[in-house]
């Protein structure tokens, strides 16, 4: 079992920036895909960005060019840099890890709230 702890959420004005962090309790990046999901009230949880074990990244269309996912193996931490934030980015953001080999163990963090409002 891996514990994931997120931090970095908060209240920001439209056009502002935030950086979310997710720290794993042990090294897992070489054997896992790391991802950020978000869920707004009344909506389904959606994938925002992910980074594979070999470093490939992908993003949902609505955040391309504004968000960047990265990781620091020495710190067991994955980041989500969010720029040019919009009110529609308001949601709870959740860190996820999924093993790349059977049984594809999956872990979730507790979430961190991001609110974009003037």
Image (spheres, helix red, strand yellow):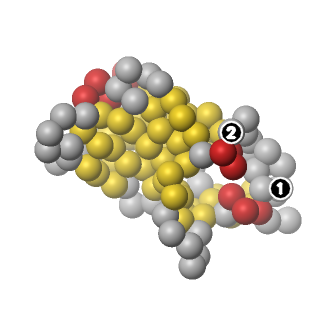
Decide which of tag 1 and tag 2 comes sooner along the chain. 1
Left or right placement of residue 6 versus residue 11 in this view: left
- Please identify the residue farthest to the front as the structure is shown: 61
Q: Left or right: 64 with respect to 107?
A: right
Query: 83 and 7: which one is in front?
Result: 83
Image position of 11 with respect to 49: above or below: below
Regarding mark 1 in the picture, which secondary structure is present there?
loop
Q: Name the residue tied to disc 1.
A: 14
Q: Residue 93: x, y in percent? A: 52, 57
| Front position in the image: 100 or 38 | 100
Please say whether residue 43 is visible from this viewpoint: yes
- Residue sitting at x 34%, y 48%: 4
Q: Tell me what residue is drawn at x 63 percent, y 60 percent.
A: 114
Residue 32 at what x, y percent from top left? 29, 34
Neighbor class of circle 2 (other Cα within 10 Å; few <14, some 14-19, many 20+) is few
Residue matched to label 2 = 64
Furthest residue toward left: 103
Residue lying furthest bottom? 42
Residue at screen point 45% across, 32% down: 51
Circle 1: is it few (<14), some (14-19), or many (20+) Cα within 10 Å?
A: some
The kind of secondary structure element at disc 2 is loop
Closer-to-camera residue (3/59) = 59
Q: Where is residue 33 in the image (x, y as percent from the top left)?
A: 35, 36
Separation of marks 1 and 2 at Cα, in angstroms: 17 Å
């Amino acid at each position: 079992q891996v514990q994931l702890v997120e931090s970095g959420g908060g209240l920001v004005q439209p056009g502002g920036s935030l950086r979310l962090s997710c720290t794993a309790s042990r090294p897992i990046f070489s054997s896992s895909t790391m991802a950020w999901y978000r869920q707004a009230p009344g909506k389904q949880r959606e994938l925002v960005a992910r980074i594979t074990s070999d470093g490939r990244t992908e993003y949902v269309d609505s955040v391309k060019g504004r968000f960047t996912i990265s990781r620091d193996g020495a710190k067991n931490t994955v980041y989500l840099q969010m720029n040019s934030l919009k009110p529609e980015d308001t949601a709870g953001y959740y860190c996820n890890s999924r093993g790349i080999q059977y049984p594809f163990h999956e872990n979730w963090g507790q979430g961190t709230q991001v609110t974009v409002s003037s």
